[in-house]
Amino acid sequence: MKSIEVRYNMLRPAQIVARRKECPVAYIPIGTLEWHGVHNPVGADTLQAEGLALLCAERGGGLVFPPLYYGESRLEALMEANAADREAIAAAMELSPDNFLPDRHPFTATDQALNYHKLLLHILAEAESLGFELGVIVAGHYPLIDHARAAVLQYNQRENGKMLAWAFVDYLLVQDQYPHAGDHAAGWETSHVMALHPQTVDLSLLPPRGDTLIGIGGTMLPQDATAAFGQQTLDAAAEIAIREVHHRLANPHLYRGHGCSLREGLWRHS
């Protein structure tokens, strides 16, 4: 059975209006281009964010904006720049590790963070201008949740703002269900990519168990990843995200006070 089309950029105006009236939520997937082991695509973070956003929109209403792969810091919280085995990562990509040094960039790490913050605010404002009542940033690259939350906090304090904003990352929503949720290119993330884009993952490229894994970290070995586990955990995260979204739509006043944008789980008590 073919799923309903929920990608904003793929719909005609009348289709957008009809779906927005049903559920005025815009999902904004954000991620990066980063090493995720020899077995995963480098767009894994953004692919996960987009896949989860599509799942939420298909099941709970709303529309999904095109994913954002660019603009985040290339100097901080990036495997190529900061991992302990960054030289091995560069060698596997046939690049010099010096490519990721600060002097190779036109902006400092602080400038890059501020530029990204402004970009997220700009995107949220675009969503509001297009008639949405809630803008939801879905972070695939874990470090970006901090940037997203900062943008959401500031955006929700706009004096003339009508749209509410929220941001989430999958593993934080389901930690009570999966104590070892979240990793980098290990079993958790690899399972997600296998569920969403199986043709992009090749587990046969991984070394034998016990051998060194380059640029991979987590409790569950990537060799143990399965599409079934990936779908299960995506479903669990989507279910909670949809509840958060609908509670915000119904009770926006609960999330507009200073710091209140980050409140989660209120739906459990309503």
Image: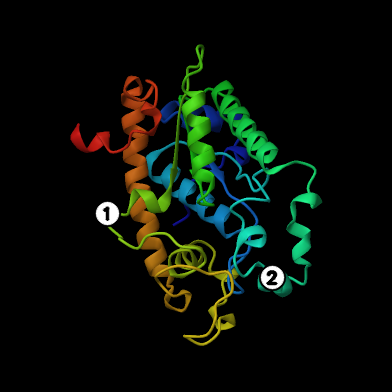
The answer to whether residue 27 of the structure is visible from this angle is no
Q: CA distance from mark 1 to mark 2?
A: 36 Å
Give the left or right position of residue 8, taking residue 145 as reference: right
Rendered image quadrant of residue 112: top right
In this figure, which residue is indicated by the disc labeled 2?
Answer: 87
Horizontal arrangement in the rendering, residue 213 relative to residue 96 (left or right): left
Q: Secondary structure at mark 2?
A: helix
- At 32% across and 45% down in the image, what residue appears? 240
Residue at 37% x, 35% y is 245
Q: Is residue 148 shown above or below 143?
A: above
The quarter in which the N terminus is drawn is bottom left
N-term mark: 1 or 2: 2
Q: Which mark is residue 176?
A: 1
Give the x, y percent position of residue 39.
Answer: 58, 74
x then y, percent, for residue 232: 35, 61
- Name the amino acid type tagged 1: Asp
**Which residue does the image show at 64% across and 48% down from the upper left?**
69
x, y percent for residue 23: 42, 31
Q: Nearer the viewer, residue 140 or 233?
A: 140
